[in-house]
Amino acid sequence: MNFEEHTKQQNNADRISVDLKTSEQHIKEIFANCQDIIYERFHFGPSYEGSAAMIYCAPLTQEMDGGQLNSALQDLVPESGDMESIQIENIREFFERRSSAFQSYELLTAYNEITEAVLDGYAILIFDGWDKVVSLDAGSVERRQVEEPTSEAVVNGPREGMVEQLDKNIALIRLRLRTPDLKIEMYQAGTLTKTRFLVGYVDGKVDPSVLAELKKRLEGADKVDALDTNYIREFVEDSVYSPFSQYRVTERPDVAVGSLLEGKIILMADGTTSAMICPTFFTELFQSAEDYYQRPVISTLIRFLRIAAFFIALTLPSLYIALSNFHPELIPTTLLLKILDTREGIPFPAFIEAVIMQFFFELLREAGIRLPRPIGSAVSIVGCLIIGEASIRAGIASPIMIIIISLTGMASFSMPQYELAIALRILLFPLMVLAFMWGGFGLMIGYILIFLHLATLRTLGKPFFSPIAPMRMMQMLDVFVRVPTKLRMRAAAKAKRAADLNTAKE
């Protein structure tokens, strides 16, 4: 027997039987020990000889009973008069050749389709003597309404955030991007969860090679029981071991639409409130949605502030260790005397002191995140104050070290992308070790290694450090400076003309 004959035989075995008892028994075997699956019988036709069954999952559907379905059936076949005059031929003809004004429905022909429909919140009607079943939409699960996202709050701009329903998230994007060029391709992940997720892009804006590469990498994602888009990221990222994330995550529909207009691809999954944007470049991790809702001058100053905060969060503790241990001559004399005065009586070297204080700071930060919101912030603030003051009084840490660790933490909080802040927390400790071992020379080694890693890292086949390395001047306009919209449009038009000219020459 060849593969096609085997597949055809399996499909025939999975087809619904015309005998109601056989179909009902088969479905009960599928949902064995599932007490939330409800089975109800009702009758129709002369002397109520016709039998039918209704099957649904109670937590996922509205409350129903046989009487309601009898009434619904009369509405679906109004010309029959009463239930005694309804024949199975009337029902078959109505559903196969007409449309229902009572409720949206779909005809199913296989048991696996019934299983998926019941678990999606549909009510299934099975009629004796018919090898098809009617699937009625009866979903009633309460879902969260559209609210302002808490992780990406802005002063100016829209305040709508994505929710856990994939269809609502698609609607929020479609309302802002009203063009048929917006393509939505649906996929399914997992054999148990069967999570729906989508790939969205704007035809004509997206790079075809990047889109083809993404689809190629998603080939194995259907075997992963995904509950969130982050479950699929390992299939998309070029390097899962890099501390830098090669994608962005947003809960804002306007950010997703802005990325689509720039030629990006978004991935969204059912049951999650975030969209994954790829490919993402390193410089985009410094950008925020609010940059484009403020004046260019203000947005530019804020971007420079973020860049300064990036270097502070990455190097301040290691720079202090290198200067205090290897290069004290670079510190002004007055400041050096103050530092030596505050460090008098401290039993640990600057490196051990920094590691201990940074460890406790990270511990308090995690505690503030995991604790309930009303007490999480209070625990973090009170914990930092108490531990910092107690450490100084006990002679374990110096005041200058408390200031350095606090400034480092504040700088990491100013990063608009949480993934970038995590990367800084990871790289902080290796740089401290290099500064402790070789001082400024060790710091230079660390900076060179980080730069080389960024320069060689790729995202969906594109250079992650672009447009800095390789240098692309036209794309540098909106990296450090928030360029006015008119100038960006002119630059984009000029780049498009240059690309069309190169294409024509080829």
Image: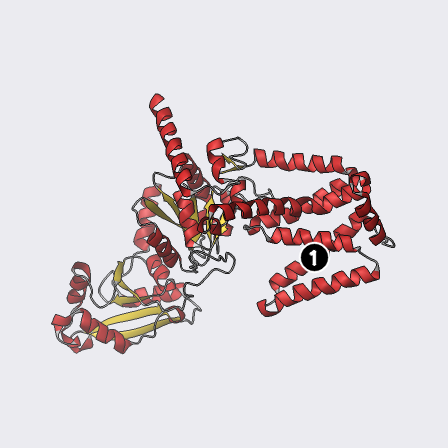
Looking at the image, which residue is at 44% across and 40% down?
214
User: Could you say which is closer to the camera, residue 153 or residue 169?
Assistant: 153
Q: Is residue 103 left or right of residue 501?
A: left
Question: Circle 1 — which element?
Answer: helix
Tag 1 residue: 361
Whether residue 89 is situated above or below residue 45 in the rendered picture: above
Q: Is residue 294 left or right of residue 311?
A: left
If the image is split into quadrants, where does the C terminus sit? top left
Whether residue 396 is situated above or below residue 504 in the rendered picture: below
User: Could you say which is closer to the camera, residue 326 or residue 121?
Assistant: 326
Write down the quadrant of residue 167 in the picture: bottom left
Looking at the image, which residue is at 35% across and 68% down?
56
Q: Is residue 253 left or right of residue 353?
A: left
Looking at the image, which residue is at 35% across and 28% down?
500
Name which residue type carries label 1. Answer: Phe
User: Could you say which is closer to the camera, residue 412 or residue 6?
Assistant: 412
Q: Position of residue 14 (x, y in %)?
A: 33, 56
Residue 352 visible in image: yes
Q: Residue furthest top?
A: 505
Q: Is residue 266 left or right of residue 400?
A: left
Q: Position of residue 17 (x, y in %)?
A: 27, 61
Q: How is the image coloured?
A: secondary structure
Q: Position of residue 141 (x, y in %)?
A: 39, 68
